[in-house]
Amino acid sequence: MSERSSVSELAGRLRVELDRYSPGEKLPSSRALVERHHVSPVTVSRALGQLAAEGLVVTRPGAGAFRAAGPGSAPAPAGDTSWQELALSADATADAVPRTVDASGVLATLAAPPAGVVEFNGGYLHPSLQPERAMANALARAGRRPGAWGRPPVEGVGELREWFARGIGGHVTAAEVLVCAGGQNALTTALRALAAPGSPVLVESPTYPGMLAIARASGLRPVPVPVDTDGVRPELLAEAFRATGARVFVCQPLFQNPTGAVLATERRRRVLALAREAGAFVVEDDYIRRLAHDDCGPLPGPLAAEDTEGVVIHVSSLTKVASPSLRIGCLAARGPVLDRLRAIQVVDNFFVPRPLQEATLELVGSPAWPRHLQSVASELRKRRQTQAATLARLLPELTVTHVPLGGYHLWLRLPDGTDDLALAAAALRRGVALAPGRPYFSAEPPAPHVRLSYAAVAGETEIVEGVERLRAAWADLSR
């Protein structure tokens, strides 16, 4: 019997068995279903995924599968909340910047897809790539450190600030580093510190949707500056500074999200000079440095390492290279702006929990850390090669204009006239989740795109399976 027919047969059996369970009641574990129906774990996963797509079950990562609530079990109608429309827009004026936030681009990388769906939309390493044992050991050791459960300095534990400063290089010192609860928290702090509500902030186009969401939630106006394969275009950046009077430019000079571009050597000093002439800050989101592949060669240093005048606000994080729950990152800055960053950080969070900081120190100081970095660098290179080659073989209609030697995703240009949202929906029906390109643009997209990640899947076999499913979705859309 083929795998496809096995999945259909098991899904049919489970539909009948659902009548035994009340809405919200947990179904037997995947292991129990494997033993009961004499099928493979993959068959169980795909059958549950099919039932989830039909709305019959709900899967919760780490908890299992549950019967979905039926039409007759709907909750009682809520009270009238229409008054909130007025309250949420009470500060609106003709000149106000809308505070409505579109978090769809962020949720696309955070939401766990149904069981059996290939996760090409993931923004974090698959559990098999995370240093879980090393992190568990580090956490256990950290808990026994003297003072580990006491209140840390608001700027962060000194030893961890020193470690981050060494990673940035140049003349950056520990005194210029603040420990933050991940990169998203650091970016939020930076934008709140540097730009008043209603003011423009220059952003790369396309760019990370989470940063656009931060800007809009803060009442800022993101102004797009196009990038190419060598990073942001300096002549357009200069024009944007002149036209808007912006005092902040946010960029990702290394393996930019989503294009994978690396800011060219001849552009780096030009970008810093343009910002200095405009009296503006450059927020450098160095989010992916530790996920360079083992065939990429020497990396350019952070922009902050070349900056002596306090132009650059540096942001980095360990979340991408370790675990989504290791919410540890840093801000680095020099001059009076550091005091403002510190003040906002303290008001928002007080401090990052000391046990997490101590565990991070134990992790990055262990022999397992360099082994983990080397292993991930090798594995991501193999996955990148597999995904790029499989796309070229099976889906030549989707153009990969640039294959970055770092990071964890590819940015695909779709043929003119393609609806990226429709393709994402068709792909999900075929069992593969991807990120449509539209949320990566702060204005109208110049062309349709999608982003495919290869970090969150189980391995190369699943990458090939995912591209095959995407080809079927493309055929569905082309009919």
Image (tube, rainbow, N blue to C red):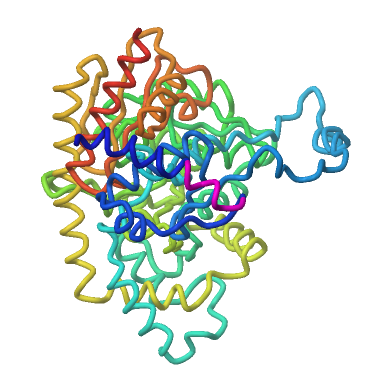
Percent position of residue 396, x then y: 20, 17
Q: From what the image shows, is residue 66 above or below residue 211? A: below
Percent position of residue 371, x then y: 17, 66
Residue 118 visible to an observer of this rendering: yes
Q: Is residue 19 magenta?
A: yes
Q: Nearer the viewer, residue 212 or 116?
A: 116
Residue at left 18%, top 21%? 394
96 relative position to 182: left or right? right
Where on the picture, by quarter, is residue 273?
A: top left
Residue furthest to the bottom in view is 146
Q: From what the image shows, is residue 343 above or below residue 284? A: below
Percent position of residue 119, x then y: 35, 41
Type of secondary structure dominating the magenta stretch: helix
Total numbered labels placed on residues in the image: 0
154 relative position to 76: left or right? left
332 relative position to 221: left or right? left
Residue 280 visible to an observer of this rendering: no
Percent position of residue 172, x then y: 37, 61
| Magenta segment boundaries in residue numbering | 16-22
Residue at left 44%, top 46%? 112
Q: Is residue 279 magenta?
A: no
The C terminus - image quarter: top left
Q: Nearer the viewer, residue 395 or 300?
A: 395
Where on the picture, by quarter, is residue 364?
A: bottom left
Q: Nearer the viewer, residue 371 or 94?
A: 371
Q: From what the image shows, is residue 212 above or below residue 360? A: above
Q: Nearer the viewer, residue 38 or 421?
A: 38
Residue at left 30%, top 14%? 475
Where on the picture, by quarter, is residue 48?
A: top left
Q: From what the image shows, is residue 183 above or below residue 268? A: below
The N terminus - image quarter: top left
